[in-house]
Image (cartoon, coloured by chain):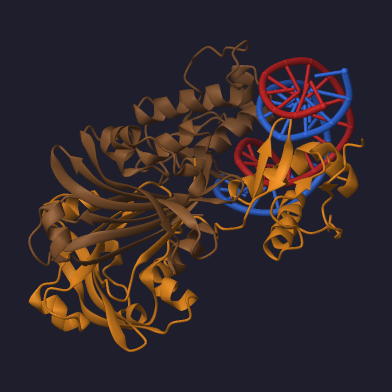
Chain colours: A orange, B brown, C blue, D red
Amino acid sequence: MPASSGTVPVPPFTLDRSSPVPLYFQVAQHLEHAIIDGTIPPGTLFHNEIQLADELGLSRPTMRRAMQHLVDKGLIVRRRGIGTRVVQPKVRRQLELTSLYEDLSASGQKPTTELLSFGTAEADEDVAARLGVTVGSLVARLDRLRSANERPIARMTNYLPERFADLDPDVLADQGLYQVLRTRGVVLHSATQTIGARTATAAESRQLGEPRGAALLTMQRTAYDDHGAAVEYGTHVYAASRYSFEIDLLTP
Amino acid sequence: MPASSGTVPVPPFTLDRSSPVPLYFQVAQHLEHAIIDGTIPPGTLFHNEIQLADELGLSRPTMRRAMQHLVDKGLIVRRRGIGTRVVQPKVRRQLELTSLYEDLSASGQKPTTELLSFGTAEADEDVAARLGVTVGSLVARLDRLRSANERPIARMTNYLPERFADLDPDVLADQGLYQVLRTRGVVLHSATQTIGARTATAAESRQLGEPRGAALLTMQRTAYDDHGAAVEYGTHVYAASRYSFEIDLLTP
DNA sequence: CAGTGGTCTAGACCACACC
DNA sequence: GTGTGGTCTAGACCACTGT
């Protein structure tokens, strides 16, 4: 029986060889759409990669690269001796390094920010260690109250290297911090965050409009640029009754 | 001035071309160690990739693949026209799909498990939706209390497809759930989890040895195998005073 | 056994950054 | 300009899977 029995080709589409978009990426994107919109249902087995490359007029390495891209996204699984199979598109995307502002905007909510304070402070031991500066040196500090749909949802304190002490308060009230940093030419590279919980203090209850002793989600995050230098350290608390973290993972 | 001014080669080592370990992986691993142990300090610029390939007697694609591996791990940054630079090795690893049992073991603590109940139950609407079965059908259910160093730290309820209803209770008390599933041939592929917080009920306070009204971390997780089928749905609560989630991220 | 993906090679041309 | 990484090609051999 022929090898292609029960297997499918890449759905027809036109490669644009004059486009600046790499060929492997055009193929990967086309397949990703086809998988997500159900044109290629879960469980489908593809033709083998040499055949696929021929069908699209590509070399095998380029075709492989497109498929590897989909493996990394968790959309397909490849097994030597078996073939390439579509899995359930359950995983939306890797956890991304976004700010709460962008999270809320993306989910269709309407974030507003109240800038409680903004200035410089001396780094204590914790802040100094996180930002990689010496204890007592000056750092920028901002306190913000973030609301979604007119209700306060998070209290955020952030520390940044002193060179950011001249940020525009109006802009900070208007955009997410990461958005502001990007306009300053900061390229974020990585971050480490710790998520925990504790009960609210009286002041926090008042600020967030939560009952006394309510549970709060806490998050501390240090973000690094692509030189490995810390650009931000934040300690945030969230009203747990109205906020939680969603994380999609792939096995390594 | 020569191109190699201020740039470094791959530290000397011997490739094993007869090993089943791929060459690109041998190179990547060697470089990873050298970066992590400080032999190649942060900020270092490598020779260009053609030169590196020559030095090791490899082709350029193979050398590129090794470097790409390190980019994915967040250890180096590459810029067209500039070169390849080592960043601070702050990011330990991507968030991994591990069980609490493995987390505790890895961190040198001594996990123990009390199996509170184990049997079958009818799936309610929530469980049915998560596991992709029909409401009212039978599923396996287990309740466990996990302790670290003799102190209870988490209360865990898990639901699995009915085919796992014959797991050995003794083994469940002895190992992590994911470990047990792997011995049954389950290949985990992905998961989605939601992390939140709430205050403890009276029963939870008692079980976890926390004060009344203490804050708890909550986590719901659905895990999928490589066919896209749900293999586990769990709702867990953790004593927030002694447990938090650590997450390292790279920008996409 | 035949078929699959995994690895590796030796070239080529291009886009971008810096001088 | 020159040098860098990014992309692409056309082959080759190997390891694993299922019959």
> Relative to A208, does residue D9 appear above or below in the rendering?
above
Give the residue at the far right of this rendering: A1
Tell me which residue sits at (29%, 62%) in the image: A163
> Relative to A243, does residue A9 appear above or below in the rendering?
above
Label tally: 0
Tell me which residue sits at (49%, 75%) in the image: A106
In this view of the protein, can residue B232 be seen by the observer? no
Relative image position of residue A100 (x, y in whole percent): 37, 70
Give the residue at the far bottom of this rendering: A150
Relative placement, left or right, of A68 versus B146 is: right
Quarter location, residue B179: top left
A6 and B169: which is toward the camera:
B169
> Relative to B20, does residue B60 appear above or below in the rendering?
below
Tell me which residue sits at (37%, 24%) in the image: B39
> Relative to B98, does residue A231 appear above or below in the rendering?
below
Quarter location, residue B2: top right
In this view of the protein, can residue B228 be seen by the observer? yes
B188 and B60: which is toward the camera:
B188
Relative image position of residue B24 (x, y in whole percent): 59, 26
| Quadrant location, the N terminus of chain A | top right
Relative image position of residue A148 (x, y in whole percent): 35, 83
Relative image position of residue A43 (x, y in whole percent): 70, 50
